[in-house]
Amino acid sequence: MPATRRAAVLGHPVAHSLSPTLHTAAYAALGLDGWQYSAIDTTVEQLGERVRDLDLGWAGLSVTMPLKHAVMDLVDHVEPSARAVGAVNTVLVAPAQSGVTLTGTNTDVYGLVAALREGLVERHGSDGVPVGDAVVLGGGATAASTLAALGELGCTTPRVLVRSLARTAGLQEAAARMGVSPRFEVLDAASAPELLAAADVVVSTMPAHAADPVAEALRSRGVGPSGVLLDVVYDPRPTALSQAWAATGGTVVGGERMLLHQAVEQVRLMTGRPAPLAAMDAALRSALSVPAA
């Protein structure tokens, strides 16, 4: 293995990514002085060329939007779990007889499970509490990973609230591949608070500000949530939804926790070593100006 290896996050736009902060902190803590991690702005049209350029000087790639689906057709192998979710966020580079072999996998599910377990520990003192009732807001790529994560936590029949049922075909297909049976409903901000407040876990996968009407309804109703909210948005933070959830008594897990834990698993896969969680956590908190836990 070369003493100097590269890794990068690809996406468009990608300049805002905190992945370089996390991975660079990990390399320093692991003593991998020759390793480098960067952010490379890459469109779907440019992705093929980027992937073809990979050689043994590369450890792997982190892949973010809008590339998580397109990259699946460009690697040699896709792990079954990533195939089921329908998205790859990590490409691993390994030696092969004729150069390299590329494997696509998904660490978003790992990150979601770990982040939700943090919230369950905070709420209940244990991460072993069964998740009987869960609600997912949004129906995009992250929603598919969320369904897989909830399945791992024991909830195979979550509600999925979306703005348009007509746009859920891909998510329904992913759910069938994963063996989960979500109930799809149209998101109505006015009636959502009671449904959300009764859930053990709520995961919002909606873009920044898209859940603001739900947050306003939650505040105006004054309903006290009984469970854990994970809002995957971490910029801007805190979101209106997470503020409303906390103000009415719920437990909030910020989207940066999912980001941290999915990067932890990426580092393990790319370096072959246990990732230095504490060092990565400290670097993330510093970048976001979050007090130490």
Image (cartoon, rainbow, N blue to C red):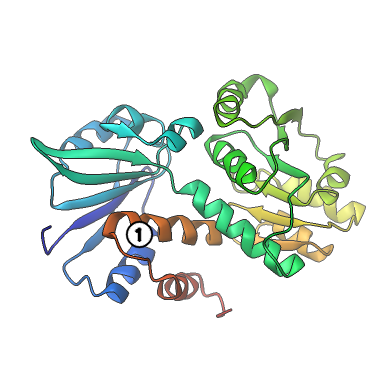
Classify residue 123 by image quadrant.
bottom right
Q: Is residue 206 visible?
A: no
Give SS at disc 1.
Answer: helix
* Residue drawn at (85%, 49%) of the image: 198
Q: Is residue 286 visible?
A: yes
Classify residue 241 by image quadrant.
bottom right
Q: Is residue 191 left or right of residue 185?
A: right
Q: Is residue 206 left or right of residue 201?
A: left
Residue type at the position of mark 1: Arg
Classify residue 188 by image quadrant.
top right
* Residue drawn at (22%, 70%) of the image: 32
Q: Is residue 165 left or right of residue 63?
A: right
- With respect to residue 166, does 50 lie above or below? below
How many numbered discs sit on the rendered protein?
1
Where in the figure is residue 11, as x and y percent of width and height? 36, 44
Where in the figure is residue 293, as x and y percent of width and height? 58, 79
* Residue drawn at (78%, 57%) of the image: 227
* Residue drawn at (58%, 40%) of the image: 148
* Residue pointed to by mark 1: 268
Residue count near mark 1 (Cα–Cα under 10 Å), binned few <14, some 14–19, many ≥20: some
* Quadrant of the snapshot with the N terminus: bottom left
Q: Nearer the viewer, residue 51 or 146?
A: 146
Q: Is residue 222 left or right of residue 12?
A: right
Q: Nearer the viewer, residue 94 or 12?
A: 94
Where in the figure is residue 205, as x and y percent of width and height? 61, 44
Where in the figure is residue 218, as x and y percent of width and height? 84, 52
Which residue is outermost to the bottom?
Answer: 292
Q: Nearer the viewer, residue 218 or 194?
A: 194
